[in-house]
Amino acid sequence: MSLDWQALHFLRPHWLWSLAALPVLAWAWRAQRQRRSAWRGHVDAHLLPHLLVRGGAEARMGLAAAVIAYVLAVLALAGPSWRQAEQPLWQVTRPLVVVLDLSSRTTASDLPPSRLLQARAKLAQVLEARAGSPVALVAYAEDAFTVTPLTDDTANIRVFLDDLAPDIMPVDGQRTDRGIAWAAQLLTQADARGGDILVLTDRADAAAVTAAAKARTQGYAVSALGVGTAAGAAYRGGDGVIARASLDAASLRGLAVAGGGRYHALTGDNGDLASLGVSSPQSTTGSATSTGGGKAWRDEGYWLLIPLMVLALLGFRRGAALVLVGALWLPMASPASAAGIDWWQRADQAEHARVVRGADAYRQGDFAAAEEAFTGVNTADGWYNLGNALAKQQRYDDAIAAYDRALRARPGMPDAVANRAAVDAARKRPPSSGGGQGKAGQQGDGKNASSGSQGGQKSDPGDQKNASPSPADGEPAPRDPGKAPSQGKPPSTGTPSPATPDAAAQSAADAAQRERMREAMARGNEQRAGNETQGKPAVQAETAEQRERRQAVEAWLKRVPDEPGSLLKAKFQLEQERRQREGR
């Protein structure tokens, strides 16, 4: 850290006026000490100068320390700064709630192919323009419902675009006022101090204008996007009656004026959204998000807190200086720091860390490092893991000794018994060719058996749910302490090979295993086919009436179409029933 004296300045310079009070505070402190002198009540004033020792070393040091501490505190509060640093810049985004009219009037075709499809396309444009900013979607007909609450992930709203239709609404109608009120409630629940409400519809009544004015008083601007044309088109209502729907631009302008927003008719491009001001999430109120970086002066006053705390420590208790020096010297002089010992770990935590370190080294093939980590872990699992690491290095005598220590700590430990027998057999067996190794690797069917052995089970950490490294085929595997040995599996009789298993033998064993699996699957298919053949007489035995009924049901099921928006429809229906029960 370099200090640029030319750039040195104070971010809060008015705190420096506090230094003017320093002489007054010093005089008050001195006067108080003189008043506290016990001799003044018993000795004449003209004799005190000859009896009292003025300006003792301890008093002068205390006064100097107090003055220095006061000056440091004032300078720290003033905010000294001499360098700049990168700092994120923030812009403010306003949440947007889109209120979509899903009444039967949206099926009118004056905006080909229909108003509804045009509204969906415009909603997709809104989501694309507002990507990364909070957006919510409310659908309304006779009542309003939440499709998605405020979210920064507009992809959650795109999922429902194709399912938005009048069919998903419980009751047909056009209560725009309820849609606006529900949107304002969503913004309030999100603690938004400001926000925009965009209504996509073709007209607004007096109740909607009143709801827009109320939302404006809450800090939310209500804008309207006209969907339709002045000429209008015919549509079939929810009751089956054919009526005509046309765009009432005047009522929508009144809605926008009451809500403090804007009005624009729906267009094919983004000009309408730009005119309404909803295509950009930036605004003067709302929630802040990071958009870039800049430079700002750093407050370096915290550096002055270090000597200030030292002075406070010296004044707290006698001998504090020795404590401070010892605290600073201990981390540098302690051999534990150089050895990498963590004083914050308990003994069992340090032991577990060594086991994990050894398991990682075992997985990476560094068996010498694994041996070093496992050495000294005086538990049955620790000796077992050490035996595995030694066996991998072909140090069979040492490995057997380690297994014996594990068995003394835990008599009858299945994994240790199996691996000790395997290592003992490998020690007694003379070196053999690659084919012999492949054959030995296929012995037995224990947890350490080769993957080529029929019916064998490989000791995999994923099967035992532990952090132990996975061994090679036919070789012992370290096991994490605290995990119970595998139960219900016979011990391995496979032996760790003195060298890497022959690749050709291993490939042949894998091929044989795949062939056996293919034959087993073929037998299963034949068995299922036989069961189906046996079941055919039961189908043929059904009566003509039963067969006719079954065929009728199957034909009826095929005629049932997949209903889009079934999830939203069920959700809105349940919400409607709940509101009716509550009398809302």
Image (tube, helix red, strand yellow):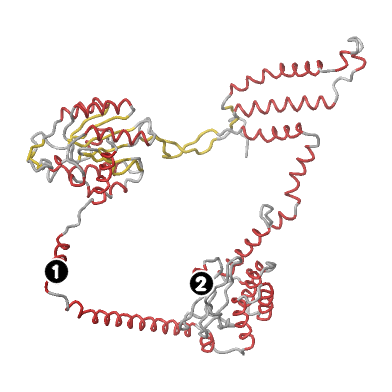
Residue 143 location (% of width, % of height): 23, 38
Against 491, residue 546 (above or below) is: above
Q: In which quarter of the image is residue 335?
A: bottom right
Residue hosting label 1: 551
Q: In which quarter of the image is the N terminus?
A: top right
Instruction: Locate residue 349: give its quadrant.
Output: bottom right
Instruction: Pinpoint residue 148: horizontal percent, then vertical percent.
Output: 31, 44
In the picture, the quarter occupied by the C terminus is top left
Q: Is residue 253 left or right of residue 6?
A: left
The disc labelled 2 sits on which kind of residue?
A: Asp
Q: Nearer the viewer, residue 257 or 166?
A: 166
How far apart marks 1 and 2 lie (CA) works out to: 51 Å
Q: Identify the residue shown where x is 20% and y is 54%.
A: 563
The image shows residue 127 at horizontal and vertical percentages of 29, 43
* The label number, if any, that marks residue 460 in the structure image: 2
- Identity of the amino acid at label 1? Gln
Task: Mark 1: give few (<14), some (14-19) or many (20+) Cα within 10 Å.
Answer: few
Mark closer to the chain start, 1 or 2: 2
531, above or below 409, in the image? below
Proximity of marks 1 and 2: CB atoms separated by less than 8 Å: no
Q: Which residue is drawn at 82% across and 16% down?
A: 34
- Left or right: residue 439 versus residue 391 is left
Mark 1: secondary structure: helix
Please tell me in which quadrant of the rendered image residue 577 appears.
top left
